[in-house]
Image (cartoon, grey):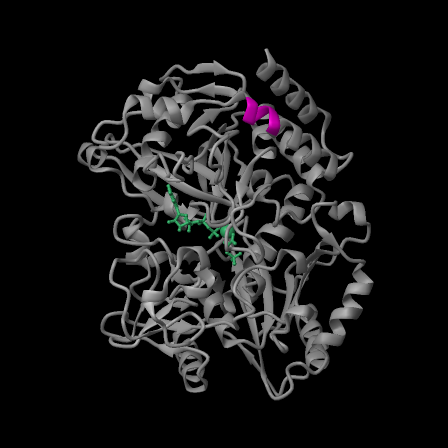
Amino acid sequence: MTKNKYVLSWIEEMAALTQPDNIVWIDGSDAQAEALRAEACSTGEMTKLNQELLPNCYLHRTAVNDVARVEDRTFICTSKKEDAGSVNNWMDPKECYDTLSKLYRGSMKGRTMYIIPYSMGIVGSEFAKYGIELTDSIYVVLNMLIMTRVGTDVLDALGDSDNYIKCLHAKADIDESKRYIVHFPEDNTIWSVNSGYGGNVLLGKKCFALRIASYLGRKEGWFAEHMLILGVEYPDGKVKYISAAFPSACGKTNLAMLIPPEFYRKKGYKVWTVGDDIAWLRIGADGRLYAVNPENGFFGVAPGTNDKSNPNALETCKSDTIFTNVCHNLDDNTVWWEGLDDNPPHNALNWRGEPWDYKKYNKADKVGTSGAHPNSRFTAKATNCPCLSSEFDNPAGVPISAIVFGGRRAKTAPLVYQSRDWQHGTFVGSIMASETTAAAAGAVGVVRRDPMAMRPFTGYNMGDYFAHWLEMGKRIPNPPMIFNVNWFRTDDEGNFIWPGFGENLRVLLWILARCDGAVEAVKAPIGYLPKAEDINIEGLEDVTLDTVRELLSIDHENWLADVENIKEFYAFIGDRVPAELYEELALLEANLKA
Ligand code: GTP
Ligand code: SPV
Ligand code: MN
């Protein structure tokens, strides 16, 4: 497949370590993928679903102890500890290579090693970056075929260069006490062992396109961010683009694929999806910031996806999709998850593969009683998405008008506010906080600071990351405006106040109007807030002007408590937090106290 001596000698070395019985190059062909699907079905690794209702769709279950990213087993191995920073786990590179080599040694005996040459971004384009993943999992191969651009053309584009990311994955024993997801940014290397789940093993995604890419972006003057990219089309046909960073399972896929409320649809508004999880952003020749989605598919959260919340996602995963850890309806050999509809299957297997009694479902113990795991996912092709942007394949990317940060905050953050300028916007991103979700192993619903939604994904020191944001701001002649949103404010009974989903377009339109200077705003201690009457609520049943006022209200006590928490968090990040952000923090405190 290639004569590249760097590639060949690295594969030889990794094969000598892992000792597979066979080595198979993945060429990106349908015939090879089909043969692998058949093999996975013959061993029980995957189940072929009802081909009339769900053509070319499959079900896979991971081990019960292996259902989410493992942040406490994820390491950044730079030669100096301070370059990884206190937010990341760190291991000395040599020590880490030694430790993991023992786990890899002979781990592929009796197995096949698959070689996946893949591209993040359009093959051959200026901004594409290449990787090769070695794995002993067919499930990984089939997911990578959907999520990235795979095949011989990647090797052709790489030529005889050594500029690619070396990714090694072995399932080994799926032993969680020996699970490691480690990154060597100085060596362009990613090693993953003892997992078979999503973000831990699809190494092009979080490991490469965020952790390694953020490290490269800082060196090379661009951004790799945990952001969706969408286009809002106006009735006159003009399209404006927004990128938005929300933490895991906080609504990126849903926002990226939103369907405008009927009121707006009738007027001719449309939303187009460019990406739902990762954006690479660079300064264009015209001085604006341009974003590309380096992925080729969606690894989306299944629970909560239905024909009201996200019909586009549902349509996208009706064919050519791999479902992971959802509920298996045995009556018609289809899949189900909580929030799909009100008809849970009566004859079904839960995400663990056990007979499932829907009557025992208990919201307080979702993991124990649900049909689908709360972090169950669909892997679906971007090209199956009905609202995929015509710019999806544009190697130049799309010009970004607004950057939006957001998270799950029951109280503190208002529905939307705008930062004063880039520096303040960077501060707003740096103080993001959100309730944790099932996307990562550990407690769910605990508020933690998650700067720019990148806490688990920054491949270097968080203080340096903030400095990179400030530095980039100085270099972008026409920077996007920066906003913060929160769809998740709750009332005293814990119900969401804002209807969310498609209705979020109303907030996006205020944001874009601000970018055009077409609407005024109110100066508040935290930035600019909308006038309540400028959030259009026409056609909304349960939302009044007073509801909007409540959603935009700021509780000074809550915010001052947050300020204290931010001080602790900045101190935890350490002395590389830029002085400019401390200035912004002091200003916020003073404004709140004034
Ligand atoms: P990752 O793939 O983990 O990075 O997540 P994501 O940010 O793409 O999250 P996703 O869009 O899949 O949403 C996760 C959960 O949030 C789903 O269960 C959604 O139903 C729910 N959700 C998304 N948007 C909204 C919203 O506007 N309001 C409310 N209340 N819930 C939402
Ligand atoms: C996330 O957790 O932010 C995801 C899913 O997008 S995973 O690929 O598993 O990281
Ligand atoms: Mn994500």
Residue 81: within the magenta? no
In percent of width and height, residue 181 lies at 65, 62
* Residue 589 x/y as whole percent: 63, 19
Comparing 163 with 467, the one in front is: 467
Residue 275 visible in this rendered orientation of the protein: no
| Residue 224 shows in this picture | yes
Would you place residue 576 above or below residue 454 in this image?
above
- Report which quarter residue 370 is drawn in: bottom left
Nearer to us in this view, 305 or 351? 351
In the rendered view, tell whether residue 174 sits above or below residue 370.
Answer: below
- 543 vs 112, left or right, is left
Callout count: 0
* Quarter of the figure that contains the N terminus: bottom right
Examine the structure image and report whether residue 559 is included in the region drawn in magenta. Answer: yes
Q: Position of residue 194 (x, y in %)?
A: 63, 72
Please give the name of the residue rendered at 75% of the width and 73% of the height, measured from the top-left corner: 101
Using residue 229 as the reference point, say whether residue 435 is left or right of it: right
**Helix, strand or loop: magenta stretch:** helix
Magenta residues span 557-561
What residue is rendered at 50% in x and 30% in y? Answer: 412
Give percent across and percent down for residue 570: 70, 34
Determine whether 63 is above or below 547 in the image: below
Furthest-top residue in view? 594
Displayed quadrant of residue 164 = bottom right
Q: Does residue 15 lie above or below 282 as drawn?
A: below
Question: Residue at the location (60% across, 57% down)?
Answer: 207
Image quadrant containing the C terminus: top right
